Image (cartoon, rainbow, N blue to C red):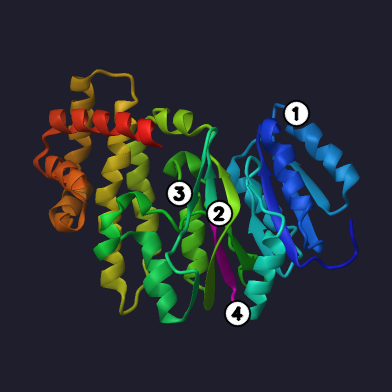
Amino acid sequence: MQENTPLISIIVPVYNVADYLKKCLDSILHQTLKEIEVICVNDGSTDDSGAILEEYAVRDDRIILVEQENKGLSRARNAALKFIRGKYFMFVDGDDWIDESTCAYMYRVASTYHSDCAMFSYIKEFSDHSVVSHIFEEELLVYEGEDIQKYIHRRLFGPIGKELMQPERMDILVSACMQLFETEKYKNIRFFDAHEKIGTFEDGLYQMDVYGNCNRFVYVQKPFYHYRKDNVSSITSAYREDFDKKMIYLFSVIEGKLPVNEMQNIYQTALKNRVGISLIGIGLNQIHSGYGVVKNAVAIKTTLNMDMFQTSLKTLPLENFPLHWRVFFLLCKRRMTLSLTLLLQIMEFLRKRVR
C-alpha cells in the first residue's frame, strides 16, 4: 500500500461481474490523477471476480481488497467506507466504468468551489447504443444553504410542480455514483442495509442523509460515468413478489427522514407525489408476474385500495403530467384496473421498442 495519503478513495463493490470487472478496474487505475486508492469489496462472488481482483491487487498497490460473504450492495459499500483515507471518496459499481480524466477534473472542481458534494453527468451504455443523461440542464450549478434543500434534498423525497412533467426522471438524483463526497464530513454515513425489506432505493436513502447535511453543492455537465444497462430487460422484467408492500415500508422509512422546518409541507407534498408515481413501477412489476390479465387486474386493485395510495391519488395534480400519464393516473383514481393492466402492457411493449 502506498504511503502517501490519496486525494480520492474509490469504492468498488463487486459481485459476479467477471465479464465487466477488468474494464472497470482499468478505467480507474488509468486515471490521470494518480493519487487515488481503490477499495474493492468482493461480496461473495461465485464467478472469476475474486481471482481478477487478486490479480489486479498484486499489480497495483493502490488497490485494497476486502473479502466478505455475500451481504448485498449496501453492506459491501459500508465495509469499504471503514477504510477510506482520501480527501474525497466516490463509488463506482463493478460493472461500470469512468473516463480517465474523471478524478482529476472533479477534484479540481470540488477544490475550486469548496464543495462537500460534487456531481457530474453519466452515459447509459446499452449493448448497441449509448445515451447521455444530464442530471440538470445547466452546464454548471452551485448551490449552498437553503438552495440545497429546495433543489436537491427535497427532490430526493419526490417531484413537485413542473418536475411532474417527467415522472420517469423522479429518481435522477438518487444514485450515489457520479459524484465526489468530502470524506471528513460524510465518512460516518452508512447505507441502509435492509434490502430485503425495501427492495431498492438504498442509494436514495443514503443521498437523503448526505444532502440533509450538505453545505455547498456543485454540478458540472460532464458525462464521465458509464452506467452499464446491457441487462436492463432482465432487471426490469423480473417479477418481484410483495413489491407493493416493500414500497410501503420504504415510504415509512422516508417519512422518518422528513425535516422539521419551514419547508416541511413542501417535503410532505413531494413524498405524497412519490407514493402516487410509484404506482407506475408497482403496476409494471405486476404485469411481469406471469399471471393473466384478469389476475393482474385483481392484484393491482388490491394495491390501489390501500389507504396510502388512495390518499396520494386524491391530491396528485394530474394537470402537470403528460397526457399518457394523466390517463394512467385517472384510471388509477377510478380503479379501472382491467383497462389499467392493458395500458401497462402497451406501455411496456413500447418501452422495450424505443429504449
The residue that appears at 46% across and 81% down in the rendered structure is: 145
Earlier in the chain: of badge 2 and badge 3, it is: 2
Q: SS for tag 4?
A: loop
The residue that appears at 72% across and 55% down in the rendered structure is: 100
Q: Where is residue 196 in the image (x, y as percent from the top left)?
A: 48, 39
The residue that appears at 52% across and 45% down in the rendered structure is: 124
Looking at the picture, tell me which residue is in the foreground, 170 or 69.
170
Q: Which amino acid does label 3 sit on?
A: Phe
Question: Do labels 3 and 4 touch, CB within 8 Å?
Answer: no
What are the residue bounds of the magenta stretch? 114-121
Earlier in the chain: of badge 3 and badge 4, it is: 4
Q: SS for tag 1?
A: loop
Q: What residue type is labelled 4?
A: Tyr
- Picture quadrant of residue 136: bottom left
Inter-mark Cα distance, 1 to 4: 41 Å
- Picture quadrant of residue 94: top right
Q: Which is in the foreground here, disc 1 or disc 3?
A: 1
Q: SS for tag 2?
A: loop
The residue that appears at 38% across and 49% down in the rendered structure is: 250
Question: Do labels 2 and 3 touch, CB within 8 Å?
Answer: no
Looking at the picture, tell me which residue is in the foreground, 76 or 252.
76
Earlier in the chain: of badge 2 and badge 1, it is: 1
Q: Which is in the foreground here, disc 1 or disc 4?
A: 4
* Disc on res. 48: 1
For the C terminus, the quadrant is top left
Residue, disc 2: 191
User: Could one spot residue 226 in this view of the protein?
Assistant: yes
Give the side of residue 99 with respect to residue 301, left or right: right
Residue, disc 3: 201
